[in-house]
Image: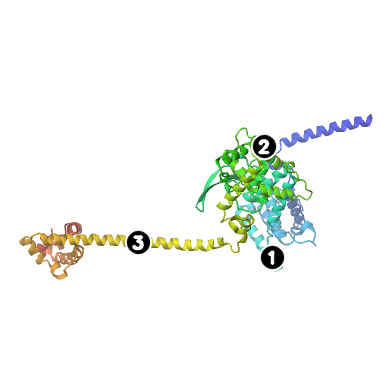
Amino acid sequence: MREDKAKEMDLDEVLVEDDIREEENAIKDIRDFSALEKSNKTLSALNYCNHFLKSYCKKEGIRYHRLEDIEFGGIDKSGNPFWDKMIASFLHYLGSTAKRNFDDSNDGLSYQTATQYASAVKQFVVNQFRLEDRISVFRDEQWRVLRKQLLSMYKENCRKNGKALVNGHEGSSDDDRVAIGTACIWVGDQRSAQFLAFDVTKYYAAGRCREISLLEVKHLTLKQMDENGRTFHVLPVKVDRDKQGGSQILPLFRPHWDHMQQDVYFAFAYNLLVNSSVDMGIVGGEPPNIHDIRGEENLWQARIVCSCLFKDDWDGHWSPAIREVLFASVLIFYPDLIELLGQHPSSKYQNLKSHPFVCVLLHALEAADVPVRRFHDWCADVRKGFLQRNCIALPINMLARNGYDGLNEIQVDARSFLTQMNALTRAYIPMSNHVVSIGEDLRRVIDRHDKLERMLVQFMESDTNNKHEDDECERLAYSDIVLVGQPKTPARLFISFFKDSYHVLYYNQLKTKQWKCLSQQERGKVSTCFRRQKRCVRHMLCFLCSFPSAPPKIGQAYTDWLS
């Protein structure tokens, strides 16, 4: 009895302590509290910094303090000078002396680890003194210099040791992803179906698992694409990028893998049918087309089966277009799925109805009163249409495997010449544009030449048919321009007239006393008047096709004649 009472008292004390701890945690500053108090990276960084401070304080002749206990003014109360020298020495320690697990027999820290520890220490100190002014060494320009020097140290060490600075992450292979997909289908439960959808989507969307798991139905739309002379629809998805921030609208195109386990549409159709068509969010790629099913009646029955598969969607989360896209992907890969289930090592799915995906599909066929043979015909129609439309993009072994258009006997893939054809097309397009430009210029020159010829013919006809007056004949006979230059067109006459006559007028005017007595402003007015007269005569020559009369040779008379 006493032991039971003691246990009850101990339990009461524990409950009281838990309540007190919960109340304390409820009023903590979010910057000082997390699920693990501090991340493992921060704890490791503080351990390395404190280990460094032991030797640093001894060398500087100051008392040792842990980093958590150092005040804003530093150990020696000098403030910024202390932090500047200490942090620079700490980064040098990380790049040269620090060993893994503080064991001298181990290798030094990698560049990624050193930079992470340096950033963790910086963030800890900045948060520790967040109410104070920023310590100078942690300002962006100075911190950037220290990081560059740390990188230079590691580059030099890598040159000496012949090692890589950063070891890249090796991506998964096709065989790995196919094996994962096969295992998920063989397991045949809801969690494996969800994992298959996440794994395939993560690969297609180049996203993190957390980003993919947050996708919802509202993030999915249908977008029209025009490519290779045909129009189809793809499913773009809105992905929120956690690392870079913001969101991205990402259209997912089917790369036409010949493995069912890597097809993004089939993965999500599989997930939706095994789990639910309401709760799960999906993304997609370039889909097949359900309209490839031959016959209006067959297409109508296929849509009924598609509606039966989504019978749980009472609220209409999934649009009819998206339902048909997903159902078409099921039709394409249903034969491959049956073949894969038959390869199970323990013959677990010898009865196909024991698999949840096939069970739901067969129940939908029964509900729509559709025979299985007709369903197989639908699969063949949709698959054939998909192969026909995507013949250029599909792998040659997939075409040969399906025996499309006698490709089982193919020896050379003629589609390899597509690259050369595209190169010729790219070279032809600028050349064709250049030829068109030359043709336009030539057409304008020909039109201009024809216009001048028509003007000349019109002038000659009017000059021949009309009888000139005596003064007009005298004007044509005594024109120095006509007699000397004998121009053939009004344009050439215009050039010759103003080149010679206005040149004479200008020098005659310069010799007169009246011109020399004029002010600069009055001379400008006279010059403006000359330019206007020149413009008027130009219009007369070009549009009236008339020749000037013989000009007098005396300067004043010449001016009067011109004006």
Q: Which residue position holds label 2?
A: 366
Q: Earlier in the sequence, mark 3 or mark 1?
A: 1
Measure how far apart labels 1 and 2 are at the Cα level.
67 Å
Choose between 332 and 222: the one closer to the eye.
Answer: 332
Q: Secondary structure beneath disc 3?
A: helix
Q: Amino acid at mark 1?
A: Cys
Q: Amino acid at mark 3?
A: Gly
- Observer-side mark, 2 or 3, equals 2
Q: Residues within 10 Å of mark 2 (few under 14, many from 20)?
A: few
Choose between 174 and 480: the one closer to the eye.
Answer: 174
Q: Quadrant of residue 215?
A: top right
Q: Amino acid at mark 2?
A: Glu
The relative height of residue 495 versus residue 235 in the rendered view (above or below) is below
Q: Secondary structure beneath disc 1?
A: helix
Q: Is residue 449 visible?
A: yes
Where the C terminus falls, by quadrant? Answer: bottom left
Where the N terminus falls, by quadrant? Answer: top right
Which mark identifies residue 158? Answer: 1
Is 46 on the left or on the right of 455, as rendered? right
Q: Quadrant of residue 484?
A: bottom left
Q: Position of residue 341 (x, y in %)?
A: 73, 48
Is 46 on the left or on the right of 411, as rendered? right
| Residue that protrudes farthest toward the left in the picture | 470
Q: Is residue 42 visible?
A: no
Q: Quadrant of residue 170?
A: bottom right
Q: Position of residue 316 (x, y in %)?
A: 60, 34
Q: Residues within 10 Å of mark 3 (few under 14, many from 20)?
A: few
Which mark identifies residue 439? Answer: 3
* Point 12% across, 66% down: residue: 479
